[in-house]
Structures are given as structure tokens and as C-alpha cells.
Image (cartoon, rainbow, N blue to C red):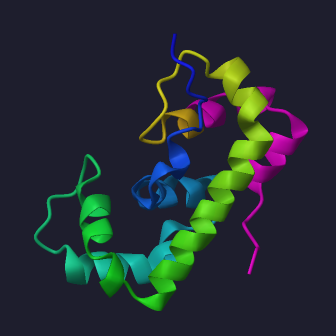
Amino acid sequence: MNTRTVFSGIEMSWVAVAAGIFCLSIAAGVSAEEVDRPCVADAKKLCKDVQPGEGRIARCMKEHEKELSPGCKKNIVKAKEKIRDVAEACKGDAEKLCKDVEPGKGRILRCLKQHEGELSAACKEQMTMPHTRS
């Protein structure tokens, strides 16, 4: 029996965070360009020869972690916080509505978005409110 929770793999590495920044920006109602401009610039600079898809850009960014701009590092920290907030608020919803969804690659977040009308008030609030921690 698999005892992993639906969000257990999210905090293992910020690679998942980097790969999820786009999804989170959509969930938060903010354009990906606005949220991730520093990371996009870093990816273009540090990973220009990497074929996008299947987490390759995120892995490249992780390999160049020490070279990331302060703005990108700050965005990654904010994205981690947002993921923790969403995971905490939506844990029950994910276990109920997405129990058969394999965690990883944004599948749980997509499932929650598909069940938007069935989410608890706390989860819905986290999914729709822009992240404002400083």
C-alpha cells in the first residue's frame, strides 16, 4: 500500500516548484510572465540549449542553482510558500477528489482545478488568491 500523501513529493526538491511555477501563477490569477520574469530570463541565459518539456528546464535550473538571479531565487521561495499553503488548505480536497491521481508533474493541481466547484472554501481561497507573502 502506498502511504505517500498527495502532496508528499512536492517539497522533496524545488525542481517540482520550478516546474509548477506556471501552474501556480494560473491558479493564483497572475500571468506567468509577471510572476516568473526573472526565472524566464535565467532559463534563457543558463538553459538556452535545453529542449523544453518533461522537467528538463527545471533540472537545468537546479544544476545552475548558484547562478540564478536574486529575483528568480525569491520567486522560487514564494512559489514554495504558495505550494505549502495550497497543500495545507487543499489536503482534504485532494484526498477526496483526486485520490486516484498520481502525484507529480502538476497532476494534483490540475485535478483540483477540474473540481473547482467542489472545493472547500479554504482550498478555493488559496487556489484563487494571489500569493502576498513578502
Q: Nearer the viewer, residue 111 or 99?
A: 99
| Residue 121 vertical placement versus 45 (above, below) | above
129 in magenta: yes
Q: Residue at x 58, y 64 (%)?
A: 79
Q: Residue furthest bottom?
A: 70
Q: Quadrant of residue 40?
A: bottom left
User: Overall secondary structure of the magenta stretch?
Assistant: helix
Q: Quadrant of residue 116?
A: top right
Q: Residue at x 55, y 27 (%)?
A: 4
Q: Is residue 98 left or right of residue 119?
A: left
Residue 77, position in %: x, y?
Answer: 58, 72
Please say whether residue 28 is visible from this viewpoint: no
Quadrant holding the C terminus: bottom right
Q: Quadrant of residue 41?
A: bottom left
The range drawn in magenta is: 111-134
109 in magenta: no
